[in-house]
Image (spheres, rainbow, N blue to C red):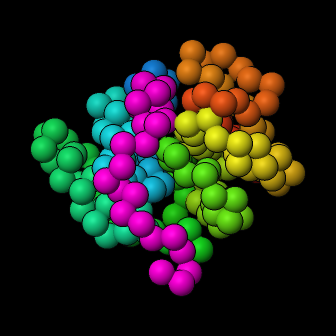
Amino acid sequence: ATTDDRMPYRAVGWPAAIPMSAAVLQADWPAGTRVLELGCGTGIVGLAALRRGYLVTFTDYELRAVVLAARNAELNHYHNFTAQLLDWRRPENTTWPVIIGCDLLYQTSAFEPLLQLLDQMLAPGGVCWLGDGGRSAPRKFWYLARERGYDVQVLDTHGQPLSQPASDFQLFILRKHAQP
């Protein structure tokens, strides 16, 4: 594609999917919390959120990924989900208390559209969890998000804080300040 790198990434078992799913399974958001999954691919992280009793909306730029994630949820007997296309450059006017994504921070060209989406779609007081397999590119994302006013914490696989992005799994937790 001329605009984006549109490879069939939805079919790939990405490195951060398992530790990210484990982190979501430990999340302490109240049951019934609305969760938006960005770049859902096969939907494994969203399935972990469904298992916790959250109301998940699977999203991706590719229709096949959205269909695959929805089918995986159905095959696992979940019904408290929706699935839809979402272009980060055209975010919706809906806000979410929780936004999750996994293995999204591999291309620096995606950072600005992702941050613009979070500016618009993450509710005041909301939280965004982004899992990464330990790439170097997220270091720039960390700084950009902080410059934009997000509180950013980075945790390792064991939930321990990191002072800087790592070379192994890292969970970026962005918090949006509640407006006065």
Which x, y percent locates residue 81? 28, 50
Q: Is residue 69 magenta?
A: no
| Above or below, comparing residue 45 to residue 83 in the picture | above
Which x, y percent locates residue 103? 52, 46
Of all residues, the one furthest to the bottom in this rendering is 2
Looking at the rendering, the stretch of residues picked out in magenta corresponds to: 1-23
Q: Nearer the viewer, residue 174 or 131?
A: 131
Q: Is residue 10 magenta?
A: yes
- Asked where in the image residue 52 lies, by quadrant, the reply is top left
Q: Residue at x 36, y 49 (%)?
A: 12
| Above or below, comparing residue 161 to residue 36 in the picture | above
Which x, y percent locates residue 58? 36, 55
| Above or below, comparing residue 117 to residue 138 in the picture | below
- Asked where in the image residue 93 lies, by quadrant, the reply is bottom right
Q: Nearer the viewer, residue 131 or 52?
A: 131
Q: Nearer the viewer, residue 40 or 7?
A: 7
| Above or below, comparing residue 74 to residue 168 in the picture | below
Which x, y percent locates residue 9? 40, 58
